[in-house]
Amino acid sequence: MTEPPRPPIRPPTGRLGILTPGMGAVATTFFAGCEAVKRSLGLPVGSMTQMGTLRLGLRTEHRQPYIRDFVPLAKVTDLVFGGWDIFPEDAYQAARKAGVLDRELLEQLRAPLEAIRPMAAVFDSAFVKNLHGPNVKRGPTKLDLAEQLRADIRGFLQRNELERCVMVWCASTETYLAPGPAHASLAAFEKALRDNDPSIAPSMVYAYASLMEGVPFANGAPNLTVDTAALQELAKKQRVPISGKDFKTGQTLVKTVIAPMLKARMLGLNGWFSTNILGNRDGEVLEDPGAFRSKEVSKLSVLDTILEPELYPQLYGDFSHKVSINYYPPRGDNKEGWDNIDLFGWLGYPMQLKINFLCRDSILAAPIVLDLALFSDLAARAGMSGIQEWLSFYYKSPMAAPGLDPEHDLFIQQMKLKNNLRHLMGEELITHLGTEYYED
Ligand SMILES: NC(=O)c1ccc[n+]([C@@H]2O[C@H](COP(=O)([O-])OP(=O)(O)OC[C@H]3O[C@@H](n4cnc5c(N)ncnc54)[C@H](O)[C@@H]3O)[C@@H](O)[C@H]2O)c1
């Protein structure tokens, strides 16, 4: 079947705004990192859009452009930042408090960071129990709060003389919420906004405002947010790209590499025990069982989808999977994760694999925010809308069409992403078949 010709991708003219609900450790590490890159004070390590290449054509052609040269992406030097938070501190103060980046580097970036002041947040302590801050909007209904956010977005665009922006959720993880009647359709959702329905979380109010303004939305936390029929309907109606959920950074990043290895070699699994210590504000919020439940669901789903126990009951039919996060203040943002994997091989003989990852949460998350922002903007300019499955690469719990299993394997996700870019640019997809090199 031949596809209709793609409409041309609109060029990334002018500057691009990036708005983050939440200006904590991840968002400020991201803002500061981009400002550092703009001034050649550091490299955007971990960002596929900035550091990565992709192969075009045959291996013998040696065509390997940088992704940033191959697809028309906004440049880091053209990014403008804004955000919302329940705390009134500007991005410089918030970055100091988060304690991720060195003071010396932050001093050099003080002026641009001080210029990023949080707009008043839409917040509901029923969804984030362990935080209390004064910088919060008031309004009679959730619809009214959404209107205030829409006015914020328009004001940000006007003040900065921008035509485009994207929104990336970098705020705290909200308490676990199962999809209910208010999320089933756009009509039900809008009625629920008017009725102040308790099942409409603040993140959904931001997402609604974003989509109504035609602004792409990416969800860095495990909250439901745009993973609902209602907001997917709105994304399609407004022709806006959406993606989520939950940045794939430390332990789950490793899990989605090791689990496909076990499966590729048909090695069995008896159990996988994962635990973490984390001392930042995210860790504090996740002390609340409701917020941890959101994270746990996001972290647990990975193994079942990769290992497919229903297809391989002898290998994966009965494994135990435990995940815990312990709030331990002395470590700050420097998370330490331990994985103990009980696997088995030939004739069922048991083996163990231990992984001890001493990572830095926000250092791993910041490049993901950048890539998601740039790719979401690209998708919008290319006329793509609704769920962007090709961005699964960046998420712990990737959104997929109803009835479709998400893809968790990091390398399949990477292939999907790169093939999507080739497809967008009218280049041949790479199948890795390789027979062409051996034909007479
Ligand atoms: N760092 C990682 O590796 C990683 C990985 C996956 C997901 N995440 C998620 O990213 C999010 C941000 O992480 P972080 O380490 O920056 O956390 P953080 O606690 O440092 O920052 C979150 C900020 O959001 C603010 N906030 C909470 N509710 C808000 C609302 N309704 N509107 C506006 N602001 C609000 C808080 O005041 C806080 O400043 C968390 O949800 C976290 O679970 C982080």
Image (tube, grey):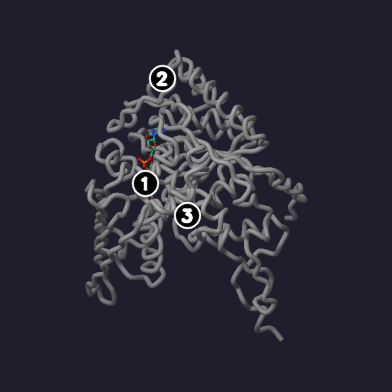
Q: Is residue 217 left or right of residue 280?
A: right
The Cα–Cα distance between marks 1 and 2, rounded to whole angstroms, is 25 Å
Quadrant location of the C terminus in the rendered image = bottom right
Q: CA distance from mark 1 to mark 3?
A: 13 Å
Image quarter for residue 376?
A: top right
Q: CA distance from mark 2 to mark 3?
A: 33 Å
Which is nearer the eye, 206 or 84? 84
Percent from the top left, x then y, of residue 97? Answer: 34, 42
Residues at circles 1 and 3 in contact by the CB criterion of under 8 Å: no
Q: Read off the residue under disc 2.
A: 197
At which x and y percent is residue 189? 49, 24
Say what secondary structure mark 3 lies in: loop
Tell me where residue 4 appears, x and y as whole percent: 76, 49
Q: Earlier in the sequence, mark 1 or mark 3?
A: 1
Q: Looking at the image, which residue sits at the far bottom?
A: 440
Q: On the picture, is 330 further left or further right than 438? A: left
Q: Which residue is mark 1?
A: 298
Q: Amino acid at mark 3?
A: Glu
Label located before the other in sequence (1 or 2): 2
When the figure is inspected, residue 186 is found, relative to residue 10, above or below; the finding is above
Give the SS element for disc 1.
Answer: helix
Q: Earlier in the sequence, mark 2 or mark 3?
A: 2
Q: Nearer the viewer, residue 78 or 286?
A: 78
Local crowd size for mark 1, using a 10 Å CA cut-off: few (<14), some (14–19), many (≥20) = many
Which residue is pictured at 61% across the width and 66% down the height?
54
Does the image show residue 183? yes
Disc 2 is placed on an element classified as: loop
Q: Position of residue 373 (x, y in %)?
A: 56, 46
Mark 2: amino acid: Asp
Task: Specify the quarter for ligand 1.
Answer: top left
- Give, as a three-letter code, the residue at label 1: Ser
- Name the residue: 64% across, 70% down: 64
